[in-house]
Amino acid sequence: MIDLLIQIDTSLFTCINSHHSLFFDKFFLVISLFGSGWIAVPLVAAVIIAVTPRSFLAKALLYAVMAGILAGVANTQIKRVVHRPRPIIYFEQGLSPGGTSLVTGSTAHQVHCVGKILRQNSFPSGHAATVFAAAAIVALLFGGYFYLGFIPALLVAYSRVYLGVHFPSDIFGGAVLGFAAALLVIVFFRKKKYLPLPESLRRKHA
């Protein structure tokens, strides 16, 4: 079963990473930037400030910060424990993501890397954790069309495989981690009655 999952992971990476063009190199390099905390955090803060009633703004920002910190700390610690090499290292060595023999010599997949070449700490994806925590905190706070925020999150996640710095399983792990961090914060404070339901919050704003 594990071997099958490894095979699927490798095949998906190869399929995505091997189809590229100059236009999409530039496009996904820009898209990937939105997974950086330096861009994602101000964007989320701007959305919360624009949507949230002033009486609840401080709490909403606090919850978003807590979700971001939780996702970031968990992501960093898991990276250190797993210490998984990036795709370029696996394919240079003729290995699969599980460390078993995959290819040899000239038959190895030539990883298409765009931007900075990364070699270590692949799992989970920090960019995926960041954007999915951001999308989830906004969606769970306000509901409705704010769930569309997962569309740009998916684009950022896809860009990381396209750019050659992550396997799909790294992306999945980061996405789950980011979403779980936001969900944990929201569920906790809703149970404590510190956080209104999305519909109520949006009606107050209206």
Image (cartoon, rainbow, N blue to C red):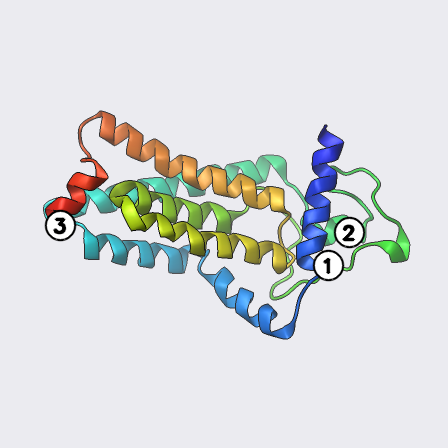
The reply to whether the C-beta atoms of the residues labelled 2 and 1 are less than 8 Å apart is yes
Reading the chain from its start, which is encountered first: label 2 or label 3?
Answer: 2
Measuring from the top left, give residue 202's x and y in whole percent.
17, 46
Identify residue type, mark 1: Val
Answer whether residue 77 is visible to the viewer in this image: yes
Q: CA distance from mark 2 to mark 1?
A: 7 Å
Residue 109 as seen in the image, left or right of residue 59: right
User: Which of the two residues, 120 or 67, is positioned nearer the viewer here?
Assistant: 67
The reply to whether the C-beta atoms of the residues labelled 2 and 3 are less than 8 Å apart is no
Residue at the image point whose x is 81% and y is 37% from the top = 100
Q: CA distance from mark 1 to mark 3?
A: 48 Å
Q: CA distance from mark 2 to mark 3?
A: 52 Å
User: Which residue in the structure is indicated by mark 1?
Assistant: 111
Reading the chain from its start, which is encountered first: label 1 or label 3?
Answer: 1
Identify residue type, mark 3: His
Q: Quadrant of the N terminus?
A: top right
Figure check: 9 above or below 15: above
User: Which residue in the structure is indicated by mark 2?
Assistant: 91
Measuring from the top left, give residue 161's x and y in whole percent.
61, 54
